[in-house]
Every structure is written in C-alpha cells, then in structure tokens.
Amino acid sequence: MSKTLKALSALLTYPTQELQDAAPEIGVVLAEDALIPAAAWRQLSKLTTELATGDLYDLQERYVLLFDRTRSLSLHLFEHVHGESRDRGQAMIDLKAQYERNGLAMTEAELPDFLPLFLEYLSTRPLAESCESLGQPAHIFAALAERLRKRHSLYEAVFRALIVLANAKPAEDAVSALMQTPDPDASDFAALDAAWEDEPVTFGPGAAGCKDSLIARVRGALRPAPDMPRNIPPRA
C-alpha cells in the first residue's frame, strides 16, 4: 500500500510543473498496485489525466479555490477536529513527535496535520498501522468527498479511495456533524470571510495561535509531492 499512499499524497499537493509531468506515472502506480476498486480508480484516472493535460494556471487556481480558500475543504485534518481551540496546538505537537520518532523529517514551515504529509508518513508504516491510522479520520474523508461531489470535482475520488484503504466505515453521526458546518462557495467572499473569522486566541501551553491558523491556510500551496518511482517529483 506504500506506493498507493504516496500516489494519493502527490495528487493532493499543489499543482506544479513537476506534478503535471509526473501525473501519468502516478496513474500507472495506482493501476499496478490495484488496491483501489474499479469505479474509484476510473475517477482517479480522470484526475491524473486532467492534471497531466490541463492548463497549469487553471489547475493551480482551482486547487487554491478548493483547498486554500474554503475552510470546509481544508487539507489540514485538525481544522475539522479542533478548529482554533487550544487542543489543536497539543495535537500538532503530539503528531510531530510521532513523525520524528519514526524517522520522518519536517521543515519548520510544515504543519503535521497536512493530509499529504500524513499520507506520506503512513506510506512508511506497516500495513495494519496505516489502515488503523487512516480509519481515525475516515469521517473527515467522507465529508470532504461529499462536498467535492457537490462541486463536481474529480478530487472526490482521492477521498473515496482513502476510505476504501482505511477499511473502516465512517461514523454517520460524525460525518453528519461535519456536514452541518458552513460550506460556502469559493466565489462568496463574504461567506468565506465569515467562515475564516478567527476565534479568540487562547494563550498558554499548547494553545493554537493565529500564526498557526495563517500557516494552515497557505500550507497546501507550499508542500511538494512526495518521492515516487521514476519521474514523480521528490519531496524537498
């Protein structure tokens, strides 16, 4: 499952020329690993084709509108669990320490809950551990997949694939709770501003401050794709 997780991680990174060049190879990796059901794989194939052949600036604009501007589609897992609460800060510390104990190096600018980084980490872990870890945020994957389906986005297939790999049924009540949170259209600037309005910052040990919030909002555009076989771009 290691190659499949790296491939899915790559698909969720900000589109660059390197990612565009590597997109066909990512499709090959997913096909050869054969861990994704046919229906989901066909949708993933459409996404890799779109990434390979689309106008790069259009791909980048779409990515930013989906994952950077829209809080309800944030690729930062703790955004959907802790929001701006002080618990988020301690959760970040704990997850970063887990990565470091198992040999995954991070840059100072990176946040550990960024989904492509989380998937890259899981690609280095034993199969049973990876599946169990994927199962924990399965309700987040389900909510993101549904929101992307409503937007007719091919990125939906990545989250459907992650649910399959987790081999865990997302808790319906948890999915329902997430789906009740605001989900404004990226073109509705007033609604977006309201959704991103910072909660009061709680200072003290483990508190998540406004700096973390700002970094979280732009993180998706800064992390490169993970290392993959042959020409898939390496992680810095």
Image (spheres, rainbow, N blue to C red):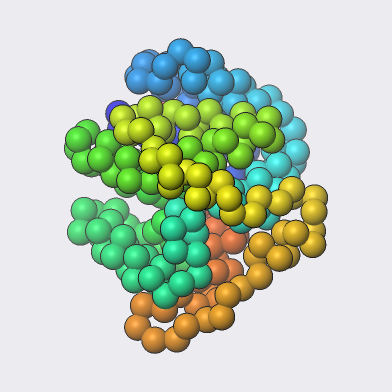
Q: In the rendered view of the protein, which quadrant contains the N terminus?
A: top left
Outermost residue toward the front?
Answer: 173
Is residue 188 found left or right of 65 in the rendered image? right
Q: Kindly identify the residue that appears in the image at 46 percent across and 13 percent down.
A: 38
User: What is the total number of numbered labels drawn onto the structure image?
Assistant: 0
Q: Locate residue 27, reporting x and y percent.
A: 49, 21
Q: In this rendering, is residue 4 above or below 18?
A: above
Q: Residue furthest top?
A: 38
**Residue at the spot x=43%, y=47% of the render?**
174
Instruction: Name the residue: 35% across, 20% down.
Output: 35
Q: Is residue 108 above or below residue 151?
A: below
Q: Is residue 217 visible?
A: yes
- Residue toward you, 121 or 65: 65
The quarter of the displayed image where residue 91 is located? bottom left
The relative height of residue 42 versus residue 140 in the rendered view (above or below) is above
In the image, residue 24 lies at what x, y percent?
54, 22
**131 left or right, relative to 163:** left
Give the residue displayed 56% in from the left and 32% down from the top.
Answer: 156
- Counting from the top left corner in percent of width and height, residue 25 is at 48, 23
The answer to whether one can see residue 221 in this image is no
Q: What is the residue that sits farthest to the bottom in this orientation? A: 204
Vertically, is 155 above or below 25? below
- Residue 181 in percent (x, y) is at 59, 54
Q: Nearer the viewer, residue 225 or 79?
A: 79
